[in-house]
Amino acid sequence: QVEGQNFLDSTLLAAVVELLLFAKKHPPYIPSSIPFLGHAIAFGKSPIEFLENAYEKYGPVFSFTMVGKTFTFLLGSEAAALMFSSKNDELNAEDVYSKLTTPVFGKGVAYDVPNHVFLEQKKMFKTGLNSVRFKQHVKLVEAETIEYFQRWGDSGERNLFEALSELIILTASSCLHGQEIRSMLNERVAQLYADLDGGFSHAAWLLPSWLPLPSFRKRDKAHVEIKKMFFKVIEKRRSSGEKVDDILQTLIDATYKDGQPMNDNEVAGMLIGLLLAGQHTSSTTSAWLGFFLARDKALQEHCYAEQKAVCGEHLPPLDYDQLKDLSLLERCLKETLRLRPPIMTMMRMARTPQAAVGYTIPVGHQVCVSPTVNHRLRDTWVERMDFQPDRYLNNNPAAGEKFAYIPFGAGRHRCIGENFAYVQIKTIWSTLLRMYEFDLVDGYFPTINYTTMIHTPHNPIIRYKRRKQ
Ligand code: HEM
Protein backbone atom coordinates (compact mmCIF):
# COMPACT_ATOMS: atom_id res chain seq x y z
CA GLN A 1 0.00 0.00 0.00
CA VAL A 2 2.92 2.33 0.85
CA GLU A 3 4.40 1.60 -2.59
CA GLY A 4 1.05 2.46 -4.19
CA GLN A 5 0.92 5.72 -2.22
CA ASN A 6 4.49 6.61 -3.34
CA PHE A 7 3.55 5.93 -6.95
CA LEU A 8 0.47 8.19 -6.62
CA ASP A 9 2.58 10.93 -5.00
CA SER A 10 5.19 10.86 -7.75
CA THR A 11 2.55 10.83 -10.51
CA LEU A 12 0.83 13.78 -8.88
CA LEU A 13 4.14 15.60 -8.55
CA ALA A 14 4.96 14.98 -12.24
CA ALA A 15 1.51 16.28 -13.21
CA VAL A 16 1.97 19.43 -11.11
CA VAL A 17 5.44 20.03 -12.59
CA GLU A 18 4.07 19.56 -16.10
CA LEU A 19 1.14 21.88 -15.35
CA LEU A 20 3.47 24.56 -14.04
CA LEU A 21 5.72 24.19 -17.06
CA PHE A 22 2.91 24.25 -19.60
CA ALA A 23 1.07 27.05 -17.82
CA LYS A 24 3.95 29.29 -18.87
CA LYS A 25 3.74 30.92 -22.22
CA HIS A 26 5.61 30.03 -25.36
CA PRO A 27 8.35 32.42 -26.54
CA PRO A 28 7.18 35.39 -28.65
CA TYR A 29 6.64 34.31 -32.25
CA ILE A 30 7.71 36.50 -35.17
CA PRO A 31 4.83 36.31 -37.64
CA SER A 32 5.32 35.93 -41.38
CA SER A 33 2.89 36.25 -44.25
CA ILE A 34 4.88 33.85 -46.47
CA PRO A 35 3.60 30.28 -46.07
CA PHE A 36 6.16 27.49 -45.49
CA LEU A 37 9.25 29.60 -46.36
CA GLY A 38 8.46 32.01 -43.52
CA HIS A 39 11.47 34.19 -42.73
CA ALA A 40 13.94 32.11 -44.77
CA ILE A 41 14.66 34.86 -47.29
CA ALA A 42 15.19 37.70 -44.80
CA PHE A 43 17.27 35.46 -42.53
CA GLY A 44 19.29 34.04 -45.44
CA LYS A 45 20.16 37.52 -46.71
CA SER A 46 21.39 38.93 -43.44
CA PRO A 47 21.06 36.56 -40.48
CA ILE A 48 22.89 38.69 -37.91
CA GLU A 49 20.88 41.81 -38.67
CA PHE A 50 17.69 39.72 -38.52
CA LEU A 51 18.60 38.30 -35.10
CA GLU A 52 19.79 41.62 -33.68
CA ASN A 53 16.55 43.33 -34.76
CA ALA A 54 14.50 40.51 -33.25
CA TYR A 55 16.49 40.76 -30.01
CA GLU A 56 15.71 44.50 -29.78
CA LYS A 57 12.02 43.89 -30.41
CA TYR A 58 11.28 40.61 -28.61
CA GLY A 59 14.09 40.14 -26.09
CA PRO A 60 16.52 37.24 -25.65
CA VAL A 61 14.15 34.37 -26.55
CA PHE A 62 11.92 34.30 -29.64
CA SER A 63 10.71 31.87 -32.29
CA PHE A 64 10.12 32.05 -36.04
CA THR A 65 9.51 29.69 -38.90
CA MET A 66 11.73 28.92 -41.89
CA VAL A 67 11.10 26.23 -44.51
CA GLY A 68 8.41 24.64 -42.35
CA LYS A 69 10.63 24.38 -39.24
CA THR A 70 10.28 26.47 -36.11
CA PHE A 71 13.47 27.88 -34.65
CA THR A 72 13.81 29.33 -31.17
CA PHE A 73 16.86 31.46 -30.50
CA LEU A 74 18.41 31.90 -27.07
CA LEU A 75 20.42 35.11 -27.27
CA GLY A 76 22.72 36.52 -24.63
CA SER A 77 24.64 34.71 -21.95
CA GLU A 78 21.74 33.99 -19.58
CA ALA A 79 19.42 32.48 -22.19
CA ALA A 80 22.27 30.52 -23.86
CA ALA A 81 22.96 28.79 -20.54
CA LEU A 82 19.97 26.53 -21.17
CA MET A 83 21.64 24.94 -24.21
CA PHE A 84 24.97 24.40 -22.50
CA SER A 85 23.61 22.90 -19.30
CA SER A 86 20.91 20.69 -20.85
CA LYS A 87 21.12 16.93 -21.22
CA ASN A 88 21.44 15.51 -24.72
CA ASP A 89 18.10 13.70 -24.49
CA GLU A 90 16.40 17.01 -23.66
CA LEU A 91 18.08 19.25 -26.23
CA ASN A 92 19.41 16.82 -28.80
CA ALA A 93 22.25 17.33 -31.27
CA GLU A 94 21.93 14.15 -33.37
CA ASP A 95 18.38 15.07 -34.43
CA VAL A 96 19.64 18.22 -36.13
CA TYR A 97 23.18 17.37 -37.24
CA SER A 98 23.14 13.67 -38.16
CA LYS A 99 21.41 14.17 -41.51
CA LEU A 100 24.34 16.31 -42.65
CA THR A 101 27.22 14.53 -40.97
CA THR A 102 26.43 10.80 -41.21
CA PRO A 103 26.61 10.58 -45.04
CA VAL A 104 29.96 12.42 -44.86
CA PHE A 105 31.68 10.82 -41.83
CA GLY A 106 29.89 7.47 -42.16
CA LYS A 107 28.19 5.24 -39.62
CA GLY A 108 29.52 4.46 -36.15
CA VAL A 109 30.91 7.87 -35.20
CA ALA A 110 29.86 11.37 -34.09
CA TYR A 111 26.11 11.99 -34.42
CA ASP A 112 25.38 8.48 -35.71
CA VAL A 113 26.02 6.98 -32.26
CA PRO A 114 24.45 7.69 -28.85
CA ASN A 115 26.07 10.78 -27.34
CA HIS A 116 27.80 8.87 -24.53
CA VAL A 117 29.68 6.88 -27.21
CA PHE A 118 30.63 10.05 -29.11
CA LEU A 119 31.89 11.53 -25.83
CA GLU A 120 34.20 8.53 -25.47
CA GLN A 121 35.40 8.99 -29.06
CA LYS A 122 36.09 12.68 -28.39
CA LYS A 123 38.09 11.72 -25.32
CA MET A 124 40.19 9.20 -27.27
CA PHE A 125 41.08 11.85 -29.83
CA LYS A 126 41.84 14.42 -27.15
CA THR A 127 44.44 12.22 -25.50
CA GLY A 128 46.32 12.41 -28.81
CA LEU A 129 46.49 16.20 -28.63
CA ASN A 130 49.22 16.82 -26.11
CA SER A 131 52.17 19.19 -26.05
CA VAL A 132 54.60 16.56 -27.42
CA ARG A 133 52.37 16.24 -30.50
CA PHE A 134 51.92 20.03 -30.75
CA LYS A 135 55.71 20.39 -30.92
CA GLN A 136 55.69 18.09 -33.97
CA HIS A 137 52.69 19.92 -35.44
CA VAL A 138 54.42 23.33 -35.37
CA LYS A 139 57.27 21.90 -37.48
CA LEU A 140 54.90 20.19 -39.90
CA VAL A 141 52.67 23.25 -40.36
CA GLU A 142 55.63 25.60 -40.81
CA ALA A 143 57.13 23.33 -43.49
CA GLU A 144 53.79 22.95 -45.33
CA THR A 145 53.21 26.72 -45.26
CA ILE A 146 56.64 27.60 -46.65
CA GLU A 147 56.27 24.99 -49.37
CA TYR A 148 52.73 26.02 -50.33
CA PHE A 149 53.41 29.76 -50.53
CA GLN A 150 56.42 29.38 -52.81
CA ARG A 151 53.92 29.60 -55.67
CA TRP A 152 52.98 33.14 -54.60
CA GLY A 153 56.35 34.60 -55.65
CA ASP A 154 57.56 38.00 -54.44
CA SER A 155 54.47 40.14 -54.77
CA GLY A 156 50.96 40.18 -56.18
CA GLU A 157 47.26 39.99 -55.41
CA ARG A 158 45.71 36.60 -54.69
CA ASN A 159 42.69 34.88 -53.19
CA LEU A 160 43.75 34.42 -49.57
CA PHE A 161 40.81 32.28 -48.50
CA GLU A 162 41.29 29.83 -51.37
CA ALA A 163 45.01 29.51 -50.60
CA LEU A 164 44.44 28.97 -46.88
CA SER A 165 41.72 26.39 -47.55
CA GLU A 166 44.12 24.42 -49.77
CA LEU A 167 46.94 24.79 -47.27
CA ILE A 168 44.87 23.71 -44.28
CA ILE A 169 43.82 20.42 -45.88
CA LEU A 170 47.55 19.69 -46.20
CA THR A 171 48.50 20.81 -42.69
CA ALA A 172 45.53 19.08 -41.05
CA SER A 173 46.22 15.89 -42.97
CA SER A 174 49.90 15.99 -41.94
CA CYS A 175 49.07 16.55 -38.28
CA LEU A 176 45.85 14.58 -37.81
CA HIS A 177 46.16 11.73 -40.33
CA GLY A 178 49.89 11.06 -40.34
CA GLN A 179 52.50 10.82 -43.07
CA GLU A 180 51.15 7.78 -44.96
CA ILE A 181 47.79 9.44 -45.64
CA ARG A 182 49.35 12.87 -46.21
CA SER A 183 51.68 11.41 -48.84
CA MET A 184 48.66 10.15 -50.82
CA LEU A 185 47.16 13.64 -50.97
CA ASN A 186 47.42 14.54 -54.64
CA GLU A 187 44.97 16.53 -56.78
CA ARG A 188 42.64 13.55 -57.23
CA VAL A 189 42.36 12.98 -53.48
CA ALA A 190 41.91 16.71 -52.88
CA GLN A 191 38.97 16.54 -55.31
CA LEU A 192 37.52 13.61 -53.35
CA TYR A 193 37.72 15.68 -50.14
CA ALA A 194 36.02 18.55 -51.97
CA ASP A 195 33.22 16.23 -53.18
CA LEU A 196 32.78 14.83 -49.70
CA ASP A 197 32.72 18.30 -48.26
CA GLY A 198 30.03 19.23 -50.81
CA GLY A 199 27.80 17.15 -48.52
CA PHE A 200 27.71 20.08 -46.09
CA SER A 201 25.16 22.08 -48.03
CA HIS A 202 21.79 23.65 -47.42
CA ALA A 203 20.33 21.07 -49.86
CA ALA A 204 21.71 18.20 -47.76
CA TRP A 205 20.16 19.75 -44.68
CA LEU A 206 16.75 20.25 -46.24
CA LEU A 207 16.33 17.24 -48.55
CA PRO A 208 16.37 13.46 -47.91
CA SER A 209 19.90 12.10 -48.32
CA TRP A 210 18.84 9.28 -50.71
CA LEU A 211 17.68 11.72 -53.44
CA PRO A 212 19.68 11.15 -56.66
CA LEU A 213 21.15 14.67 -56.78
CA PRO A 214 24.59 14.91 -58.48
CA SER A 215 26.18 16.48 -55.38
CA PHE A 216 24.78 13.71 -53.13
CA ARG A 217 26.10 11.03 -55.51
CA LYS A 218 29.54 12.63 -55.61
CA ARG A 219 29.56 12.84 -51.82
CA ASP A 220 28.66 9.15 -51.46
CA LYS A 221 31.21 8.00 -54.05
CA ALA A 222 33.95 10.11 -52.44
CA HIS A 223 33.05 8.68 -49.03
CA VAL A 224 33.55 5.11 -50.26
CA GLU A 225 36.85 5.91 -52.01
CA ILE A 226 38.36 7.83 -49.11
CA LYS A 227 37.39 5.13 -46.64
CA LYS A 228 39.04 2.50 -48.87
CA MET A 229 42.22 4.55 -48.85
CA PHE A 230 42.14 4.91 -45.06
CA PHE A 231 41.37 1.22 -44.51
CA LYS A 232 44.55 0.25 -46.36
CA VAL A 233 46.69 2.51 -44.16
CA ILE A 234 45.00 1.37 -40.93
CA GLU A 235 45.37 -2.28 -41.95
CA LYS A 236 49.07 -1.78 -42.75
CA ARG A 237 49.68 -0.12 -39.40
CA ARG A 238 47.87 -2.86 -37.51
CA SER A 239 49.66 -5.68 -39.30
CA SER A 240 53.15 -4.15 -39.19
CA GLY A 241 52.96 -3.77 -35.42
CA GLU A 242 55.09 -0.64 -35.81
CA LYS A 243 54.09 2.12 -33.35
CA VAL A 244 54.26 5.55 -34.95
CA ASP A 245 53.97 8.50 -32.59
CA ASP A 246 50.92 10.22 -34.10
CA ILE A 247 47.18 10.70 -33.77
CA LEU A 248 46.27 7.85 -36.09
CA GLN A 249 48.16 5.53 -33.73
CA THR A 250 46.33 7.04 -30.74
CA LEU A 251 43.00 6.21 -32.38
CA ILE A 252 44.10 2.68 -33.37
CA ASP A 253 45.34 1.92 -29.85
CA ALA A 254 42.50 3.60 -27.92
CA THR A 255 39.76 1.57 -26.25
CA TYR A 256 36.23 2.31 -25.12
CA LYS A 257 35.39 2.03 -21.42
CA ASP A 258 34.38 -1.62 -21.96
CA GLY A 259 37.88 -2.41 -23.26
CA GLN A 260 36.86 -2.68 -26.95
CA PRO A 261 39.06 -0.87 -29.49
CA MET A 262 37.54 1.19 -32.29
CA ASN A 263 37.04 -0.85 -35.45
CA ASP A 264 38.56 0.26 -38.79
CA ASN A 265 35.33 1.87 -39.89
CA GLU A 266 35.18 3.98 -36.73
CA VAL A 267 38.85 5.01 -36.97
CA ALA A 268 38.36 5.99 -40.64
CA GLY A 269 35.15 7.88 -39.80
CA MET A 270 36.96 9.80 -37.06
CA LEU A 271 39.77 10.71 -39.48
CA ILE A 272 37.25 12.17 -41.93
CA GLY A 273 35.33 13.95 -39.15
CA LEU A 274 38.42 15.53 -37.62
CA LEU A 275 39.73 16.76 -40.95
CA LEU A 276 36.42 18.35 -41.94
CA ALA A 277 35.53 19.72 -38.48
CA GLY A 278 38.69 21.79 -38.61
CA GLN A 279 38.79 22.57 -42.32
CA HIS A 280 36.31 25.41 -42.90
CA THR A 281 36.41 26.65 -39.35
CA SER A 282 40.19 27.13 -39.43
CA SER A 283 40.49 28.34 -43.03
CA THR A 284 37.83 31.06 -42.69
CA THR A 285 39.25 32.16 -39.35
CA SER A 286 42.78 32.32 -40.80
CA ALA A 287 41.57 34.32 -43.79
CA TRP A 288 39.68 36.83 -41.62
CA LEU A 289 42.71 37.19 -39.35
CA GLY A 290 44.77 38.03 -42.46
CA PHE A 291 42.33 40.75 -43.48
CA PHE A 292 42.20 42.27 -39.99
CA LEU A 293 46.02 42.43 -40.00
CA ALA A 294 46.14 43.83 -43.54
CA ARG A 295 43.66 46.56 -42.54
CA ASP A 296 45.79 47.67 -39.58
CA LYS A 297 49.40 47.89 -40.73
CA ALA A 298 50.64 49.11 -37.33
CA LEU A 299 49.17 46.03 -35.66
CA GLN A 300 50.68 43.79 -38.36
CA GLU A 301 54.10 45.30 -37.70
CA HIS A 302 53.66 44.82 -33.94
CA CYS A 303 52.97 41.13 -34.53
CA TYR A 304 56.11 40.87 -36.64
CA ALA A 305 58.16 42.73 -34.02
CA GLU A 306 56.75 40.42 -31.35
CA GLN A 307 58.15 37.44 -33.26
CA LYS A 308 61.59 39.03 -33.39
CA ALA A 309 61.43 39.82 -29.69
CA VAL A 310 60.29 36.29 -28.73
CA CYS A 311 62.12 34.10 -31.25
CA GLY A 312 65.23 36.16 -31.88
CA GLU A 313 66.22 38.82 -34.42
CA HIS A 314 67.19 36.20 -37.04
CA LEU A 315 63.91 34.34 -36.76
CA PRO A 316 65.04 30.72 -36.43
CA PRO A 317 62.55 27.93 -37.26
CA LEU A 318 59.39 28.17 -35.17
CA ASP A 319 59.18 26.33 -31.90
CA TYR A 320 56.09 25.42 -29.87
CA ASP A 321 57.28 27.07 -26.63
CA GLN A 322 58.00 30.32 -28.43
CA LEU A 323 54.73 30.13 -30.32
CA LYS A 324 52.91 30.08 -26.96
CA ASP A 325 54.63 33.37 -26.08
CA LEU A 326 53.34 35.19 -29.17
CA SER A 327 50.62 36.74 -27.08
CA LEU A 328 49.69 39.65 -29.35
CA LEU A 329 49.17 37.29 -32.30
CA GLU A 330 47.11 35.09 -29.98
CA ARG A 331 44.92 38.02 -28.93
CA CYS A 332 44.44 38.96 -32.60
CA LEU A 333 43.22 35.43 -33.28
CA LYS A 334 40.96 35.55 -30.26
CA GLU A 335 39.46 38.85 -31.42
CA THR A 336 39.01 37.45 -34.96
CA LEU A 337 37.03 34.58 -33.45
CA ARG A 338 34.89 37.13 -31.60
CA LEU A 339 33.96 39.20 -34.65
CA ARG A 340 33.93 36.35 -37.19
CA PRO A 341 33.17 33.09 -35.34
CA PRO A 342 32.95 30.51 -38.13
CA ILE A 343 30.06 28.64 -36.52
CA MET A 344 27.33 31.22 -36.47
CA THR A 345 24.65 29.00 -34.94
CA MET A 346 24.67 25.93 -32.73
CA MET A 347 21.49 23.92 -32.90
CA ARG A 348 19.58 21.31 -30.90
CA MET A 349 16.16 19.68 -31.15
CA ALA A 350 13.84 20.16 -28.17
CA ARG A 351 12.80 16.59 -27.29
CA THR A 352 11.12 17.72 -24.06
CA PRO A 353 9.53 21.09 -23.15
CA GLN A 354 12.27 23.50 -22.08
CA ALA A 355 11.95 26.36 -19.61
CA ALA A 356 13.93 29.43 -20.75
CA VAL A 357 13.85 32.84 -19.05
CA GLY A 358 10.14 32.79 -18.28
CA TYR A 359 8.96 30.89 -21.37
CA THR A 360 8.36 27.27 -22.24
CA ILE A 361 9.87 26.09 -25.53
CA PRO A 362 7.67 23.33 -26.95
CA VAL A 363 8.87 19.93 -28.15
CA GLY A 364 9.94 19.97 -31.82
CA HIS A 365 11.47 23.46 -31.87
CA GLN A 366 15.02 23.73 -33.16
CA VAL A 367 16.75 25.56 -30.36
CA CYS A 368 19.66 27.80 -31.41
CA VAL A 369 22.44 29.82 -29.83
CA SER A 370 24.43 32.26 -31.95
CA PRO A 371 28.06 32.95 -30.99
CA THR A 372 28.09 35.82 -33.52
CA VAL A 373 25.25 37.63 -31.78
CA ASN A 374 26.53 36.94 -28.25
CA HIS A 375 29.97 38.21 -29.26
CA ARG A 376 28.65 41.65 -30.13
CA LEU A 377 25.78 42.36 -27.74
CA ARG A 378 25.51 46.06 -26.97
CA ASP A 379 25.19 45.65 -23.19
CA THR A 380 28.01 43.15 -22.95
CA TRP A 381 30.88 44.42 -25.07
CA VAL A 382 32.55 47.82 -25.04
CA GLU A 383 33.11 49.25 -28.56
CA ARG A 384 31.60 46.01 -29.69
CA MET A 385 32.24 46.29 -33.44
CA ASP A 386 35.88 47.35 -33.17
CA PHE A 387 38.78 44.95 -33.62
CA GLN A 388 40.63 45.46 -30.32
CA PRO A 389 42.93 42.55 -29.43
CA ASP A 390 44.02 44.33 -26.26
CA ARG A 391 40.53 44.10 -24.77
CA TYR A 392 41.63 40.67 -23.45
CA LEU A 393 44.30 42.29 -21.30
CA ASN A 394 41.43 43.40 -19.06
CA ASN A 395 40.07 40.85 -16.66
CA ASN A 396 36.46 41.02 -17.74
CA PRO A 397 36.24 41.91 -21.41
CA ALA A 398 32.60 40.82 -21.55
CA ALA A 399 31.04 42.11 -18.35
CA GLY A 400 32.04 38.78 -16.75
CA GLU A 401 29.22 36.91 -18.51
CA LYS A 402 29.80 33.18 -18.76
CA PHE A 403 28.58 32.60 -22.32
CA ALA A 404 29.35 35.97 -23.90
CA TYR A 405 32.38 34.49 -25.71
CA ILE A 406 31.67 31.05 -27.16
CA PRO A 407 33.44 30.52 -30.53
CA PHE A 408 34.12 26.89 -29.53
CA GLY A 409 30.75 26.27 -27.88
CA ALA A 410 30.38 25.02 -24.30
CA GLY A 411 29.07 22.07 -22.33
CA ARG A 412 28.99 18.47 -23.52
CA HIS A 413 29.33 19.37 -27.21
CA ARG A 414 32.24 21.75 -26.73
CA CYS A 415 34.96 21.73 -29.36
CA ILE A 416 37.99 19.50 -28.71
CA GLY A 417 39.99 21.06 -31.54
CA GLU A 418 40.52 24.49 -29.95
CA ASN A 419 44.15 24.04 -28.90
CA PHE A 420 45.06 22.41 -32.18
CA ALA A 421 43.33 25.21 -34.11
CA TYR A 422 45.32 27.84 -32.17
CA VAL A 423 48.61 26.00 -32.84
CA GLN A 424 47.79 25.58 -36.52
CA ILE A 425 46.58 29.13 -37.21
CA LYS A 426 49.29 30.82 -35.14
CA THR A 427 51.98 28.79 -36.92
CA ILE A 428 50.58 29.63 -40.36
CA TRP A 429 50.39 33.36 -39.60
CA SER A 430 53.77 33.51 -37.88
CA THR A 431 55.26 31.95 -41.00
CA LEU A 432 53.36 34.25 -43.37
CA LEU A 433 54.33 37.39 -41.46
CA ARG A 434 57.97 36.40 -41.81
CA MET A 435 57.54 36.06 -45.58
CA TYR A 436 55.30 38.95 -46.57
CA GLU A 437 53.74 42.29 -45.73
CA PHE A 438 50.02 42.31 -46.44
CA ASP A 439 47.71 45.11 -47.59
CA LEU A 440 44.07 45.44 -48.51
CA VAL A 441 43.49 45.92 -52.24
CA ASP A 442 42.41 49.55 -52.69
CA GLY A 443 41.13 49.62 -49.11
CA TYR A 444 38.58 46.82 -49.68
CA PHE A 445 37.85 44.83 -46.51
CA PRO A 446 35.76 41.75 -47.44
CA THR A 447 32.06 41.77 -46.69
CA ILE A 448 30.54 38.58 -45.28
CA ASN A 449 29.25 35.93 -47.67
CA TYR A 450 26.16 34.54 -45.95
CA THR A 451 25.30 32.02 -48.68
CA THR A 452 27.83 29.44 -47.46
CA MET A 453 27.08 27.35 -44.35
CA ILE A 454 30.16 28.78 -42.66
CA HIS A 455 30.27 32.48 -43.39
CA THR A 456 33.26 33.20 -45.58
CA PRO A 457 34.87 36.47 -46.73
CA HIS A 458 33.45 37.78 -49.98
CA ASN A 459 35.96 38.40 -52.79
CA PRO A 460 38.90 37.65 -50.45
CA ILE A 461 41.76 39.08 -52.53
CA ILE A 462 44.78 40.34 -50.62
CA ARG A 463 47.90 42.26 -51.75
CA TYR A 464 51.29 40.96 -50.63
CA LYS A 465 54.93 41.92 -50.97
CA ARG A 466 57.98 39.95 -49.84
CA ARG A 467 59.52 41.34 -46.68
CA LYS A 468 63.05 42.67 -46.85
CA GLN A 469 65.01 40.65 -44.29
C1 HEM B 1 38.77 27.81 -35.45
C2 HEM B 1 38.53 26.54 -35.38
C3 HEM B 1 37.30 25.91 -34.79
C4 HEM B 1 36.13 26.47 -34.33
C5 HEM B 1 35.77 27.94 -34.28
C6 HEM B 1 35.29 25.38 -33.86
C7 HEM B 1 34.03 25.57 -33.31
C8 HEM B 1 33.28 24.55 -32.74
C9 HEM B 1 32.00 24.74 -32.10
C10 HEM B 1 31.26 26.05 -31.98
C11 HEM B 1 31.60 23.53 -31.65
C12 HEM B 1 30.31 23.23 -30.88
C13 HEM B 1 29.19 22.78 -31.79
C14 HEM B 1 27.87 22.64 -31.09
O1 HEM B 1 27.79 22.79 -29.86
O2 HEM B 1 26.88 22.39 -31.76
C15 HEM B 1 32.61 22.56 -32.00
C16 HEM B 1 32.57 21.22 -31.67
C17 HEM B 1 33.51 20.30 -32.10
N1 HEM B 1 34.65 20.56 -32.82
FE1 HEM B 1 35.34 22.37 -33.36
N2 HEM B 1 35.95 24.22 -34.05
C18 HEM B 1 37.17 24.48 -34.61
C19 HEM B 1 38.16 23.56 -34.95
C20 HEM B 1 38.06 22.22 -34.73
C21 HEM B 1 39.11 21.26 -35.05
C22 HEM B 1 40.47 21.63 -35.63
C23 HEM B 1 38.64 20.04 -34.71
C24 HEM B 1 39.30 18.69 -34.80
C25 HEM B 1 40.53 18.49 -35.07
C26 HEM B 1 37.30 20.20 -34.17
C27 HEM B 1 36.50 19.19 -33.70
C28 HEM B 1 35.30 19.37 -33.04
C29 HEM B 1 34.54 18.28 -32.43
C30 HEM B 1 34.90 16.80 -32.45
C31 HEM B 1 33.42 18.88 -31.82
C32 HEM B 1 32.39 18.17 -30.96
C33 HEM B 1 30.98 18.19 -31.45
C34 HEM B 1 30.02 17.60 -30.43
O3 HEM B 1 30.42 17.12 -29.39
O4 HEM B 1 28.83 17.64 -30.72
N3 HEM B 1 36.98 21.54 -34.20
N4 HEM B 1 33.64 23.21 -32.68
Image (cartoon, rainbow, N blue to C red):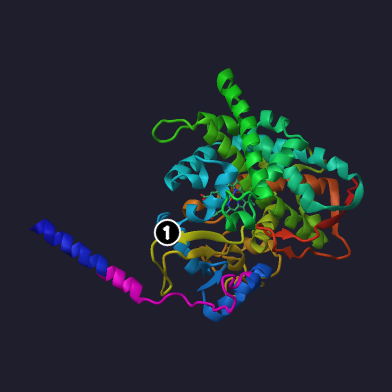
Q: Which residues are magenta?
A: 16-40
Up-down: is 408 above or below 171? below
Quarter of the picture holding the N terminus: bottom left
Residue 464 magenta: no
Up-down: is 58 above or below 72? below
Under circle 1, the secondary element is loop
Residue 17 magenta: yes
Q: Residue furthest front?
A: 212
Residue at 56% in and 53% down: 208
Is residue 319 visible from the viewing direction of this image? no
Circle 1 residue: 86
Q: Residue furthest bottom?
A: 57
Q: Amino acid at mark 1?
A: Ser
Q: Main secondary structure of the magenta part?
A: loop
Quarter of the picture holding the C terminus: top right
10 Å crowding of disc 1: few (<14), some (14-19), many (20+): some
Where is residue 302? Give x, y as percent. Answer: 78, 56
Where is residue 99? Give x, y as percent. Answer: 54, 51
Instruction: Identify which residue, 148 or 192, lies in the foreground.
Output: 192
